[in-house]
Image (cartoon, rainbow, N blue to C red):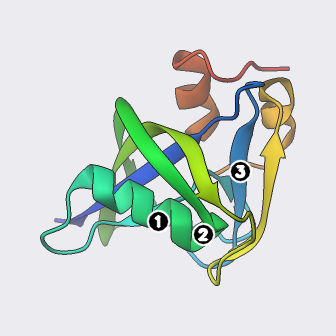
Amino acid sequence: MPKTIQAACAVIQREDGAILMVKRLNPPEAGLWSVPGGKVEPGESLRAAAAREAFEETGLRVEVGRKLWTAQLALDDEFVYELHDFAATPIGGALQAGDDAAEVRWVPASQISSLPLVAELLDHLCAAGLATRR
């Protein structure tokens, strides 16, 4: 039976609707684009983890808002990631790729589907009304 890993993610959106995307530097799914996120530390709330991961990966401080979705993602037989994605708004900091991000950039919602994305992300963004398919 695979081990479940709790993860929290921040879907950071600017006023113009662009979403901050992170090109993953490390496995799983290295080289693909995602929203900032990662493992929840012991004793950490999901929202606090989303804010911490956003800062570590992008240099931006964010205000974490409503939960957008929860999804389970099994990338192998050993682990299942339970992803908790939250809406977030930038409130400070300076945009720069963190040590586990190859690149960070604002992407207009209409262009997100043209990026090589991590598994199932486009489906969730479209269902939340944050992106469209080409």
- Identity of the residue drawn at 45% across and 51% down: 9
Q: Residue furthest bottom?
A: 99
Q: Residues within 10 Å of mark 1 (few under 14, many from 20)?
A: many
Residue that carries the numbered disc 3 in the rendered image: 21
Dot 1 amino acid type: Glu
**Mark 2–mark 1 contact, CB under 8 Å?**
yes
Left or right? Give the position of 57 relative to 46. Answer: right
Structural crowding at the residue carrying mark 3, measured as other residues with C-alpha within 10 Å and reported as few (<14), some (14–19) or many (≥20): many
| Residue 8 sits in quarter | bottom left
Q: CA distance from mark 3 to mark 2?
A: 10 Å
Of residues 69 and 52, which is closer to you in this image? Answer: 52
Q: At 78% from the left edge and 25% from the top edge, which residue is drawn?
A: 16
- The residue at which mark 1 appears reads as 53
Label 2, secondary structure: give it: helix
Give the amino acid at mark 3.
Met
- How far apart are labels 1 and 3 at the CA level? 13 Å
Instruction: Pinpoint residue 3: horizontal percent, then vertical percent.
Output: 20, 68
Residue 57 shows which numbered tag?
A: 2
Per the rendering, the mark at residue 86 is: none
Q: Residue at x 20, y 66 (%)?
A: 44
